[in-house]
Amino acid sequence: MRNARLTALVVALLTIILVSTSACSFSKQDHEREAGPFTPQFSGGQAPATPTPPPPTSRDKGPCADPDNTVIITCLASTAAVYPGPSAQDAFVAERTTGKVLSTLPGTWKLLTLAQFDVDASGDGGLMDFAFSPTYSQDHLIYAYITTPSDNRIVRIAPGDVAKPILTGIPKGPTGNLGSMMFVGDQLVVATGDAGNPGAANDPGSLAGKMLVLGSINVGSPAPPRILVSGLGNSPAMCPEADSDNFYISDQAVGGDRLQQISLHADTASGNVSVTGPPKVLWTWPDQPGVAGCAAAGGTVMVSETKTQRIESLVPPTDKNPTMEAPKVVLEKRFGALGRGAAGQAGFVFATVNKQYGKPGKTDDRVFIIPPSAGQTEDRD
């Protein structure tokens, strides 16, 4: 049923864009919900075993065409969140410094601006993440995690309107602002950075360094968020694995970068989101390679790194295979400094951050896809 609903939504949205010149009418956005016990947005489902990279002749030759046929978006400002679109050539991406939410225009290298937010992009702040409303097909609302001159906050925007605040007062620092957000069912879950102050992450009076669930996502109906997890470090990125109980979060802590597993649950009757027990640390990187994001599918977690310019794959332990093995490098120094990622039907998508941390080439910053088979193991229960 879930795949049929997604297919119908994708077909409808692609039909809209093919018959309309309105940039804001294209959104595969609900790539989407109802995946397993909780419903993370953009959960793309378990990736197929056969990779489907875009053929190099399937697009126009536009001014920013990239010769690498795994690259699907080019010539971006410095990026933040990225999510897969309805095909191997499509994606949604946040430009951290411009505040734009962009999507691909199928068959071309052109981009559509779905929304733009006023942001303070100093340090590592700006437009850090975005999520489409669970009822986007009716209300066309886009939620965003942004930095302003005074704080980090959650806002939402409607077509033709200005952004309205949902949650304000998340601490802002010279660094440690980058965080992530996602819908779990109808609840909005936010992972905040420590704002450059690790002590604030364990302070119950601070919203820094926390995983929060918002009490309300309505403008003008403030409700204090509930703290699900404390002690998060810099650049926390949440990555659910669709059609499973697995939920992971990567961050950069004082003792090293790390990947943690969290028991996140959503009650099917009330919709309330909760966490059972403390996070379980699966792996740490004491050399601090700059873990930037993670993406999970098919029993594998891909972790991207900014400093080492690598993607490493990890296979979390299961009851059948309880041993945690060392990560395997599946990509290194091919695209430069790496930022956020996500898993989709056609593979894992990742964005580069060369304009912030690397040496940008003529088509940077970029979004690329790697096959789901990279680093995967079979028959893991």
Image: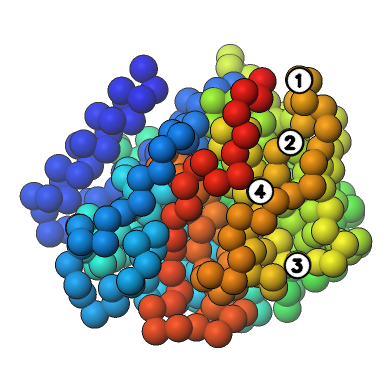
Q: Are marks 2 and 3 in contact (CB under 8 Å)?
A: no
Please state which of residues 8 and 122 is positioned toward the viewer in this rendering: 8
The local crowd at label 4, few if under 14, some if 14 to 19, many if 20 or more residues have their Cα within 10 Å, is many
In the image, residue 59 lies at what x, y percent?
20, 62
Residues under labels 3 and 4: Cα distance?
14 Å
Q: Amino acid at mark 1?
A: Lys
The local crowd at label 1, few if under 14, some if 14 to 19, many if 20 or more residues have their Cα within 10 Å, is few
> Residue 313: which disc?
4
Residues under labels 4 and 1: Cα distance?
19 Å
Q: Which numbered disc, 1 or 3, marks the residue closer to the eye?
A: 1
Q: Secondary structure at mark 1?
A: loop
> Residue 69: which disc?
none
Please state which of residues 81 and 379 is positioned toward the viewer in this rendering: 379
Residues under labels 1 and 2: Cα distance?
11 Å
Q: Are marks 3 and 4 in contact (CB under 8 Å)?
A: no
Q: Secondary structure at mark 3?
A: loop
Residue matched to label 1: 320
Image quadrant holding the N terminus, namely top left
In the image, residue 164 lies at what x, y percent?
47, 58
In the image, residue 269 lies at what x, y percent?
58, 14
Q: Are marks 4 and 1 in contact (CB under 8 Å)?
A: no
Residues under labels 2 and 3: Cα distance?
20 Å
Q: Secondary structure at mark 4?
A: strand
Q: Specify which label sits upstream in the sequence, 1 or 3.
A: 3
